[in-house]
Image (cartoon, helix red, strand yellow):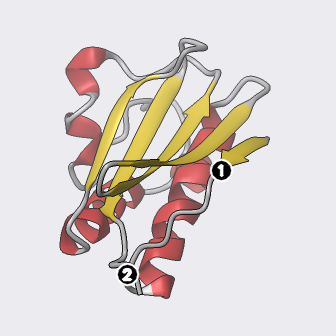
Amino acid sequence: MTVDAEPAEVTGSRGQLGRVLANLLDNAGRHARERVVVTVRREGAWAVLGVDDDGEGVAEADRERIFERFVRLDAARSRDDGGAGLGLAIARDVAVRHGGTLTAGEAPTGGARFELRLPLAPAS
């Protein structure tokens, strides 16, 4: 795993936001061939967390559907190995409740990119 991060502070539930990060890292780890890249940057008033993997990626037609509860794209995996299809739905719900977004796209390596955007904490 590679991490490239700049300081970016957000306000919210440490437990819930930690769960989002854990879910995204777990998901990337399950689908990566060899590499997961995590980035954190500031973009205007937003903290942007990116989690990229070098796996097969998510088809464009499925990039919204994967955030629905109980959706699993690979039916061949057992629920023990692949989860129940709730993690990404919960992660997006937490992002929205914190004033942000969670989207899926394509990583530069061709795998999946999940991008979490949260409002930066007010300067103190």
Coordinates of residue 80 in the picture (x, y in percent): 59, 55
Quadrant location of the C terminus in the rendered image: bottom left
User: Measuring 54% from the left and 12% from the top, which residue is drawn there?
Assistant: 110
- Look at the numbered disc 1 and give the secondary structure of its residue: strand
- How far apart in space, not on screen, are marks 2 and 1 (Cα)? 18 Å
Residue 85 can be seen, yes or no:
no
User: Measuring 26% from the left and 26% from the top, which residue is drawn there?
Assistant: 62
- Look at the numbered disc 2 and give the secondary structure of its residue: loop
Q: Is residue 55 above or below residue 30?
A: above
16 on left or right of 50: left
Q: Is residue 58 above or below residue 121?
A: above
Given residues 120 and 20, the one toward you in this image is: 120
Could you classify mark 2 by the number of other residues whose Cα lies within 10 Å: few (under 14), some (14-19), or many (20 or more)?
A: few
Q: Is residue 74 above or below residue 110?
A: below
**In the image as oriented, which residue stretches furthest toward the front?**
124
Which residue matches tag 2? 11
Q: Identify the mark nearer the N-term, 2 or 1.
A: 1
Which residue matches tag 1? 5
Given residues 44 and 32, the one toward you in this image is: 44
